[in-house]
Amino acid sequence: MAIQAISNQIYEDYLQLRANNQQPPISHDEFVAALETWYEQFQTGECSLGYAAEQLGITQIDFIYLLDELGWKAANL
């Protein structure tokens, strides 16, 4: 799944969400790769929204916020 370029603002927002959850920062490239992997698995029904969020080091609510910022669907139906 090829994804659009992730803006620095969205990446910075993600880093702040991770910091709020006492998670260490990751690089922009690591973020894009992880987001691509877990979002694709969520969209294909291989994992839940909550599990994908957990793998990204953020809460489910924060993941929904992030997806909204990207304009991506937060449902896999």
Image (tube, grey):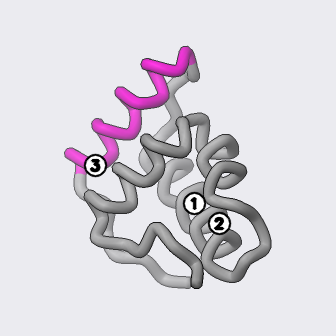
Residue at label 1? 33
When the figure is inspected, residue 76 is found, relative to residue 30, above or below; the finding is below
- Disc with the residue nearer the chain's start (3 vs 2): 3
Of the pair 65 and 4, the residue shown nearer to us: 65
For the N terminus, the quadrant is bottom right
Q: Residue at x 31, y 61 (%)?
A: 68
Residue 69 horizontal/vertical position (percent) = 26, 58
| Residue range corresponding to the magenta coloring | 8-22
x and y, in percent, of residue 6 in the image: 32, 61
**Residue beneath the point at 54% across and 36% down:** 58
* Three-letter residue code for mark 2: Thr
| Label number found at residue 10 | 3
Q: Residue lying furthest right in this view? A: 46
Residue at 58 percent across and 84 percent down: it is: 77
Q: Which mark is residue 37?
A: 2
User: Label for residue 20?
Assistant: none
Q: Nearer the viewer, residue 71 or 33?
A: 71
Q: Is residue 21 magenta?
A: yes
Is 11 situated left or right of 18 in this image?
A: left
